[in-house]
């Protein structure tokens, strides 16, 4: 199931390798975020990439354009397949990231984070943004694509409107995958969720699933259930 990416939100290299060894062949890749990267560093990214895994390095780069461009090059040289930048970094930073990726021998996909799922409109207001959250998300997504990014990260709530606005080309990567119909257990901090088939139907290119797989008693069985659920709904 190439569209299913598993978030390796664990603390150690051993746990990450254990999960990857079990899930390889059933899922389409592994997301490494700031938690695991800060603990285990680039050698884990390289180790998994060397095993043939697609690595989604979710470090949400947000810095001046030259620094982000160098970080993108470094990530690409490790064998990263996809990575994130913050779209709030602006057009110059986003274009620099896209150009840096494009110049690599194996260009990683660069996707933009718009507004974090932990934000509501009050929080957006506190950081000086007065327009509605949905408008902010759509406008940053459009900026990302216009600046040359391959796509964006979007929660289930924003998925439909964003696919409509961006058209079929850009990648949309969607976390927040849950739902009884898919046999995935929920009950956590994800505020806006969709089942896997529903998310793909709504326009997601890739799904990011963490705890429903990595915290399951049997992660492989959980991944297989979600992969099977993705096949429903007309695919
Ligand atoms: O919730 P789950 O464990 O499936 O999370 C998978 C990924 O979704 C996390 O690695 C994180 O990047 C993202 N996430 C999010 N909003 C939350 C919780 C997690 O976007 N509230």
Image (cartoon, rainbow, N blue to C red):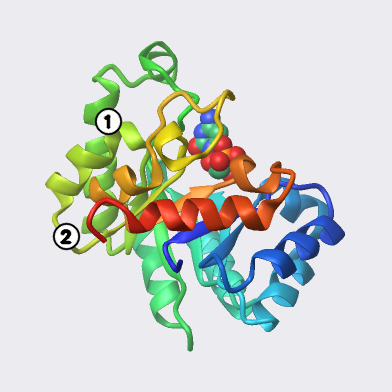
The mark that comes first in sequence, 2 or 1, is 1
Q: Quadrant of residue 3?
A: bottom left
Q: Quadrant of residue 147?
A: bottom left
Mark 2 residue crowding within 10 angstroms, few (<14) / some (14–19) / many (20+): few
The residue carrying mark 2 is 168
Under circle 2, the secondary element is: loop
**What crowding class fits label 1: few (fewer than 14 Cα within 10 Å), some (14-19), or many (20 or more)?**
some
Q: Position of residue 186 (x, y in %)?
A: 55, 29
Pick the residue in front: 62 or 26: 26
Residue 56 vs residue 147, the one in the foreground: 56
The residue labelled by disc 1 is 136
Residue 50 in picture, x, y percent from top left: 69, 83
Label ID, residue 23 = none
| Res 221 quadrant in image | bottom right
Q: Secondary structure at mark 1?
A: helix
Location of residue 161 with respect to 101 vertically, above or below: above
Nearer mark to the viewer, of 2 and 1: 2
Could you tell me which residue is drawn at 46 percent across and 66 percent down? Answer: 1
């Amino acid at each position: 199931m190439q569209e299913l990416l598993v978030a390796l939100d664990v603390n150690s290299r051993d746990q990450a390798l254990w999960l990857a060894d079990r899930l390889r062949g059933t899922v389409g890749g592994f997301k490494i975020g700031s938690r695991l990267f800060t603990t285990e560093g680039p050698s884990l990214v390289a180790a998994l990439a060397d095993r043939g895994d697609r690595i989604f390095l979710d470090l949400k780069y947000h810095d001046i354009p030259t620094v982000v461009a160098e970080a993108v090059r470094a990530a690409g040289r490790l064998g990263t397949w996809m990575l994130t930048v913050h779209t709030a970094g602006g057009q110059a930073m986003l274009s620099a990231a896209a150009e840096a990726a494009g110049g690599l021998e194996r260009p990683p996909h660069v996707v933009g984070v718009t507004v974090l799922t932990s934000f509501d409109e009050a929080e957006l207001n506190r950081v000086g943004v007065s327009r509605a959250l949905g408008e902010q998300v759509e406008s940053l997504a459009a900026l990302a694509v216009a600046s040359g990014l391959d796509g964006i990260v979007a929660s289930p709530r924003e998925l439909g409107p964003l696919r409509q606005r961006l058209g079929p080309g850009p990648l949309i990567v969607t976390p927040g995958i849950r739902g009884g119909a898919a046999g995935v257990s929920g009950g956590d901090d994800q505020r806006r969720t969709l089942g896997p088939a529903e998310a793909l139907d709504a326009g997601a290119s890739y799904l990011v699933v963490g705890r429903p797989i990595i915290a399951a008693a049997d992660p492989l069985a959980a991944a297989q259930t979600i992969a099977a659920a993705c096949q429903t709904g007309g695919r």
